[in-house]
Image: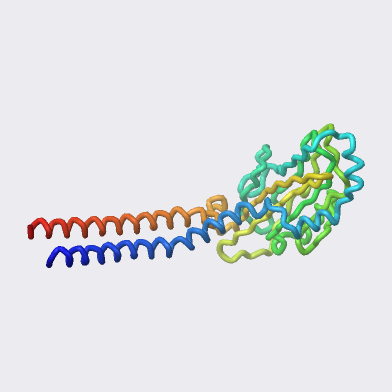
Amino acid sequence: MNRTERRSTLARRLEAALLGCLVVILGLSPCVALAAEQGEVSSTASGVLSEELASILKANVDFDALKAASENVGTSKLEIALEETLVDEYGNSLGEKTEQGNACTLVPGHTYLIDPVVIVEQGSVPCYLFAVMSDELREIVEIEDSSAQLSANGWICVDEDRGVWKYREMVDATTSEVTVPLMEDFTVKADWQPEGQVYFEQTFAAYAVGEDTWATTTTSTPFTSSQATTSSTDMPKTGDNVIPLLIILSLLALAASTFLVVSCVKSEEGKHGKES
């Protein structure tokens, strides 16, 4: 084989190796992008004020009243928080407060202390409060536990389909912090029969709307059935483990292709040295 033929063979091998690497990386790229997008959505969706939700909130706010109440406030601060009692696996109080939600194991007939409150921080402008409840427990808890307690605590349902509730009156925290309770507890139906591992989640998102500003915060409590073998707090979110794995596979493909290219070059150099 002459020098021209050797160069042609080497070029073809290099092209094949690089093409293989490119195919692998391009094939994995959409997966990485999809996993990243899903992970981002799962972690940020609850904090996004969509146009649909914004229109519902605005339709239930008396902006004239807000303007009058905010006239001499002299600040634009509006800060809220969601807080609840920290509980153990079976919903019993641990004597502390948390803004991170809880993780519980569901048992038929058992009552769980789940008592989120909305806190409007001192110095905030007058505002109207809204709560959006995404409650996957509706089918297994005693009838209307959550809704009845929300109503008793002064919340009015303004959009049943989307679970949007409005606090009955404007909140003024300009001189002192204001705490508004959402609910206190719920009881799982005694005749509930979970089939294997079951996973539920109860999420509250709170919104405060001022004259020309708004604020939001969320809290989420995951629940698993008593038959669960994996703690709900250990369940990975979408994209948490997929992205690193795909990146590693891409790097391995690149390393393998590089090794193949180097091997081809050394092989041709060795042949050329012998023939010389």
- In this rendering, would 245 be left or right of 270? right
Q: Give me the residue at 83% from left, 58% from top.
A: 158
Query: The N terminus lies in which quarter of the figure?
Result: bottom left
Residue 129 in the image: above or below residue 228? above
Q: Position of residue 90 (x, y in %)?
A: 63, 49
* Residue 120 or residue 140, whichever sits in front: 120
* Count of marks placed on residues: 0
List x then y, in percent, for residue 91. 66, 48
User: Quadrant location of residue 85?
Assistant: top right
Q: Which residue is more in the foreground, 267 or 69? A: 267
Position of residue 116 measured from the top left corner of the image (x, y, whole percent) = 73, 46
Specify the quadrant of the image occupied by residue 23.
bottom left
User: x, y (%) of residue 241?
Assistant: 48, 54
- The residue drawn where x is 75% and y is 54% is 132
At a point 68% along the width and 51% down the height, the residue shown is: 47
* Towards the viewer: 243 or 106: 243
Q: Quadrant of the C terminus?
A: bottom left
> Considering depth in this image, is 118 or 40 the residue closer to the camera?
40
Residue reaching furthest front? 4
Q: Left or right? Give the position of 61 relative to 44.
A: right
Residue lying at 21% horizontally and 57% vertically, measured from the top left: 265
Residue 157 is left or right of residue 115, and the answer is right
Please say if 258 is above or below 128.
below
Q: How is the image coloured?
A: rainbow
